[in-house]
Image (spheres, rainbow, N blue to C red):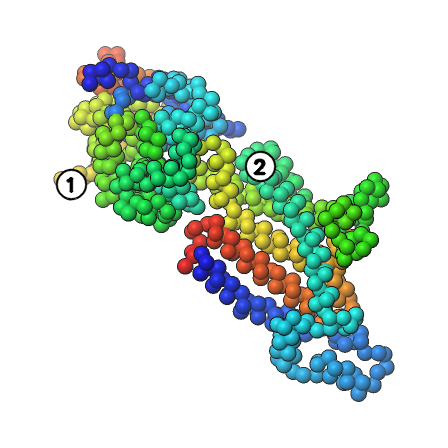
Amino acid sequence: MFVYALRRILYTIPIAIGVSLVCFALIHLAPGDPLSSVIPEGASAEMIAQIRTAYGFDRPLPVQYLKWLGHVVTGDFGTSIMTRRPVLAEVLPAVLNTLTLASAAVLFGFALGCLFGVISGYVAGTPTDRSVAAFSITGVSIPHYWLGMVLIVIFAVNLNVLPATGMGEGGSGSFGFNWDSLQYLILPALTLSVIPAGIIARAVRGTVAEVRKQDFMQTLYAKGLPGRRVFVHVVKNALPAVLAVMGLQLAQLLGGSILVETVFAWPGTGFLLNNAIFTRDLPMLQGTILVLAMFFVLINLLVDILQTAVDPRIKRA
Amino acid sequence: MSAVSKQAPLVEVEDLTVRFTGRDLDIRVVNGVSFTLDRGSSMCVLGESGSGKSVTLRALMRLFPPTATLDGRIRVDGVDVLALGENQLRQIRGGLISMIFQEPMTALDPVFTIGQQIAETLVYHEGISFRAAHARALSLLELVQVPSAKRRLEAYPHELSGGLRQRAMIALALACKPKLLLADEPTTALDATVQIQILLLLRELQHELGMATIFVTHDLGVACEVADKIAVMYAGKFVEAGSAEQIIGAPRHPYTQGLMNSTIHADMRGVKLDPIPGAPPDLTDLPPGCPFAPRCSVAREPCLGLQPELVALEGGQKARCLQYGAAPSFAHAPLLQAS
């Protein structure tokens, strides 16, 4: 197990390098000149060349990549073209904010998804099962930015019980575990949790129903085990498949939702990414995407290791 | 010894019917089965797939989805199985009665070790600690002659061979010293050499532990190897029952005779096999008369309209066929098919 975990961790190094390469290449493949927003109108060709040199854009791409990578490894993601502050100083708080939002959404969405999934997996084929299916399809299909706006209208405008946008008076700096801060979290977290809840519910339902059809279920009942102990068997068998789906959903949520964070003015990575794209802030874009991609890699690693811990059939050697 | 034999039988089944009902199905899978089984003795239920033999076996511990309806009477060791509530039922499952299944690979939970699976049964039935149960599991594996049992206790089912898995399954079934062991085709999924080992082990354990066993199989060889009594099942009913010697030596029902004729012996090289023609009937659409009549080589006209009863013959053997004890006109009716 330990050796497997170690090897799996080592495997992430080439994956990470690949990710950084794609990350770098994507931005240079995108049409348009990243410097167009920095260069003042009517600038002379000489001046443009000077700015190019200052940002290092005059060198060949491989050199630019290696230089960028070298800086990234030491934690230097460059300086934002727009704010002229280090990218990392902008990305980290945003990541933290998105993490807060994603954790709340995950807690709520996964709990709801598991609950409904297990219930309908146990009663597969019944009207209850079909209504849960309807619920999860609705959850997956509702555009969440629209749901966000509807929730704002209901809870902030009409009922006036929850704040509409932002993170509170002190912004992300003073966000803490108290009602003053947490009330800002409720609506965006609820909005974000709906799609994962639907997806998890469907995945859990399918896996649980599948496990319950296996021959060994009969053995468990023939042994005279009580329902709660049989449930432990169902959970442990269903877990690897469900973990994989959860990992993907979690990674997606950590990427931040551009739309939901914009609707709720939540200063997370989605919000940051949105700004970076519109202002063609290249270092910022690269830095944010890289950090998010690394989250994906990390969560995949975590899911892989967890799956192996749960399911002995996954080769450990 | 005579005191034991005068005791009431361990298992008494009377007029058992099992129906599966759903939105658009209503099948009688078992249709009036009665038998008794003495303590410590063994019975084998023979039949083709779909004859209702596995369902009869499962009925003894009511191991069914909620779509099944059971009628009749089942008493095991004085317990009225059909009257039990969920909790009491759980206590006799794995306690008084336990079961081993056909396919040990899929019948064991793949993500729990053999030791955990045996131990949890003990924990729930005897209320002992998991640690103590684990120690008992080790002695159980040794009882069923699993080599290097200690290592196998920590193994997952996929890490064992088919034979070892079935031994582990047997150890699991024996965990709480059941008085009745049910075995649903316990050797069908195994290699021929392993089959014999498992059968010998089961017979040995049965004598050693004094439990009664009911086997379900379609394999005549298994039946004569293990059984004191044999019952032959067809379309949800017993068509013949008797001691193993009677059934194998002198089968009386045409279906049993057909089964014997379609069995391969070593001295049959070059002899043309004589299989039973046709296929078992559709249980949702049974013929009005004898369900075997369409495939029977000695069927006469009354067979198509009259349901035969189980008739007692000499020596306690019973057969469900109109040629025994029926109206004298039966023998004069013409055969339906010349063979």
Q: Position of residue A248 (x, y in %)?
A: 59, 54
Gap between marks 1 and 2 measured at Cα: 55 Å
* Circle 1: element type: helix
* Circle 2: element type: helix
The amino acid at mark 2 is Ile
Q: Residue A172 occupies which quadrant of the picture? A: bottom right
Q: Is residue A175 above or below residue A44?
A: above
Q: Where is residue A48 in the image (x, y as percent from the top left)?
A: 79, 83
The answer to whether residue A110 is seen in the rendering is yes
Q: In this view, does A185 lie above or below B273?
A: below
Q: Mark 1 belongs to which subunit? A: B
Circle number at residue A119: 2
Could you tell whether A187 is left or right of B329 in the image? right
- Name the one closer to the observer, A305 or A202: A305
Q: Mark 2 belongs to which subunit? A: A
Q: Residue B240 occupies which quadrant of the picture? A: top left
Circle number at residue A22: none
Circle number at residue B266: 1
Disc 1 residue crowd, few under 14, some 14–19, many 20+, Cα 10 Å: few
Residue at left offset 56%, top offset 42%: A205
For the C terminus of chain B, the image quarter is: top left
The amino acid at mark 1 is Ala
The answer to whether residue B258 is seen in the rendering is no
For the N terminus of chain B, the image quarter is: top left
